[in-house]
Image (tube, helix red, strand yellow):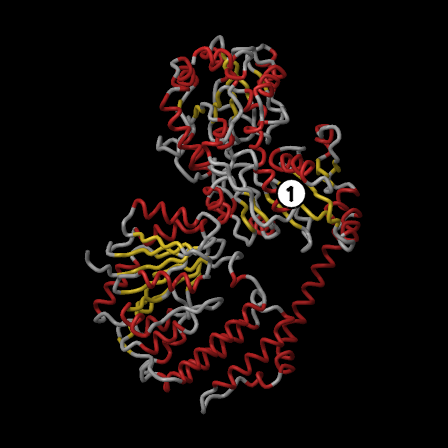
Amino acid sequence: MAMPRFSVIVPARGVQGFLRHCLDSVLTQSPQEVELIAVDDCSDGGDGAIIDAYAATDPRVVPVHLTRPGGVGPARNAGARRATGEYLLFLDGDDFLTPGALAAADARLRAAGDPDVLLFDHDRLNVWEQRHASDDREFLEAHADTVFTAEDVPACLTVQPAAWNRVVRRDLWETHGFAFADGPYDEVPVVFQTLLAAARIACLDRVCVTWRKRRRGSASTVPGRHHFAVLDRYDALFRVVSGTGLGGGVETARDVLFAHAADRLLRIMDDDGRVRPGDRPDFFRELGRVLRRHRPADAELPPHLNSYAVYRSRQRAGTLRHRTVKTLRARRNRTARSVYRRYYALQLRRPVDENLVVYAAYWNRGVLCNPAAIHAKARELAPHLRGVWLVDRKHRDDVPPGVPAVTVNSRRYWEVMARAKYLVNNANFPATVHKRPEQVYVQTHHGTPLKKMGMDLRRHPAAAQGVSFLRMLDHADQWDYCLSSNPHSTEVWQRVYPSDYETLPTGYPRNDAYFTATAEDVRRIRAELGIAPGATAILYAPTHRDYERGFHPPLDLERLVDALGEGHQLLVRTHYFYGADSRLAALEEAGRILDVSRHPSVEELALASDALLCDFSSLMFDYANLDRPIVVHAADWEAYRHARGVYFDLLSGAPGDTPGHVAGDAQEIADVFHSGRWADDRSTELRAAFRDRFCPYDDGFAAERVVRRVFLGEDELLPVVPAADRTVAPPPREAEPGADEAADART
């Protein structure tokens, strides 16, 4: 096999939300002579599984799984040791190559006679998907047609010191035994060493890499003393430069390198996102020691390095302006607060109640969904905790007897929001609530995303009306834990809610009911709903359409009921965004349907049904746990897909995408049921693949995982029960009295 032109090395840990984009950006390049070495740095997320899936379908992907986490530097080194290409390109797992990048790099390398290092341009992409040009463009354009050394053009040492904006000839790398450091700022000093050692350097004035600037979730976005490591890195660099064996450019380039280091270290020190104000005196003193220790003979130290007091005075004017703005803002906020919010401010000064948990669901609609399941399990496993629910006044009567609840915006509401140790929600708290550092916030979510969510909605204005993305980001910044029901969700949540919470692959607590319910429970629920024994109960749960006002049934329900005929019972559940509907009330009064829109538990409705008739509701993902037939009505799929945006093609028919047979109108739906196709082998196969993809963590113990990990402080999550060993609630026909005896007789 011919030697690949490029070995692209991608370290991956906690980047599953971006990794597919990164890998695709490499594998879709031309020329195809590329080796993609993807290094799973012992990730506890889905990175390793994504890498293995790509390796299984593309021989150019070389998976490397480390046995213990080592960080970005050691992961890059492990990938470099496996490389066989002529050139090495180190690409972070949350960044990506631009289209045609490798072809352009290959052309420039050939035109330059295959130099040791090729520097190329990059741009930055923030969370708003705004692109910003690099500061290197002017230099790269000025030297786009030349080949040089660091001695010839010392300014090459001022190019962004990153691993991903250059390719390095592999034999140069191996000859000198280059390696990335272990820990923060691992690219220093090796990016400089390669330039100093290179006999020939070329430039490409083209953006080849997009650097995704993360808001949270990486060492570079978290302030702390770990940023002091950059001082050690530059200290080590200058020690190497003072030695021998790196080429003749060392002496002439030292002044430029020193000036670059001084400037960069000062900018790091002044960055609020890196060095905390309280740590700056220590950083400042050590910075001065490093620069004095390695100052070239003719170089001058920056004048303010002689005294920390001088540095402080330089900052005073800017600090004063900042404090003035902050004070004025605080005054405006205090003026706008109500009496209760002033009371909230007072409560924030009181100690946190270590045994108090606040629960909320669907914007305070009641005791529902994942928070309800967690609350129930906490009562069992952590009885020392006191749980209280937040409810709107109009939903106050929906709270079950014996469940403590407070009305939103009451005096007690502001007290518990200020003092509860734990906050558990499947949606958002209002912007007036500010999580204290001592509080722990668990975001449970309330569905698996088929439709676009979070920051992805910016491209879909019909769905994003009234959405404040700044507030959305501020809210995600408060999360400590984010629950996930499957790897797909984990990838999406990380990308669309970019912050530094911990994702817990627990499964959805609300789905525990599908594994703990008994045949008696199924019979009881059906009887309470009034479903006739032996009837085929079809749960119809259409989702909300962002491009419509009010509830407009996508199906002609009267026609559907007529087409289904005797022996079928249609249960209709509208989205919780909608209120009571007179048309449904009339159909129910006429005995045509059961309107279960106000039933408190969708899990009970699922348990009572024989099949799900859905469109694009996330209920399909939860229902798949029951291993009961799913029929998809998708007449307006194209309108929904374009207006809302989706993450995969629900109608593709591919295993894992489509959960069952697809029907376009009422008659087609009826035909699916009358013909028996709703429960045939094809339906079973599609459902099994869908369940494998979207239900890997749900096994009846999701709520217990959350309680033990978050409330009881256990380090490890309970292991997931293998799919083959799970016991799911029996379908209605098997739950009927005498079903077991009849089955035994048939056997």
Residue 210: % across, % down: 40, 59
- Please state which of residues 567 and 156 is positioned toward the viewer in this rendering: 567
Is residue 463 shown to the viewer in this render?
Answer: no
Q: Residue at 52% x, 35% y: name it.
A: 698
Residue 609: % across, % down: 53, 20
Q: In which quarter of the image is the N terminus?
A: bottom left
The residue furthest top is 566
The image quadrant of residue 606 is: top right
Q: Residue at 36% x, 86% y: name it.
A: 252
Q: In which quarter of the image is the C terminus?
A: top left
Q: Residue at 36% x, 47% y: name it.
A: 52
- Neighbor class of circle 1 (other Cα within 10 Å; few <14, some 14-19, many 20+) is many
- Please state which of residues 572 and 483 is positioned toward the viewer in this rendering: 483
- Please state which of residues 529 and 540 is positioned toward the viewer in this rendering: 529
Up-down: is 381 above or below 596? below
Is residue 24 shown to the viewer in this render?
Answer: yes
255 vs 317, left or right, is left
Residue 206: % across, % down: 32, 64
Residue 436: % across, % down: 69, 54
- Identity of the amino acid at label 1? Val
The image quadrant of residue 258 is: bottom left
Mark 1 lies on residue? 424
Up-down: is 510 above or below 678? below
Kind of element beneath mark 1? strand
- Please state which of residues 391 and 51 is positioned toward the viewer in this rendering: 51
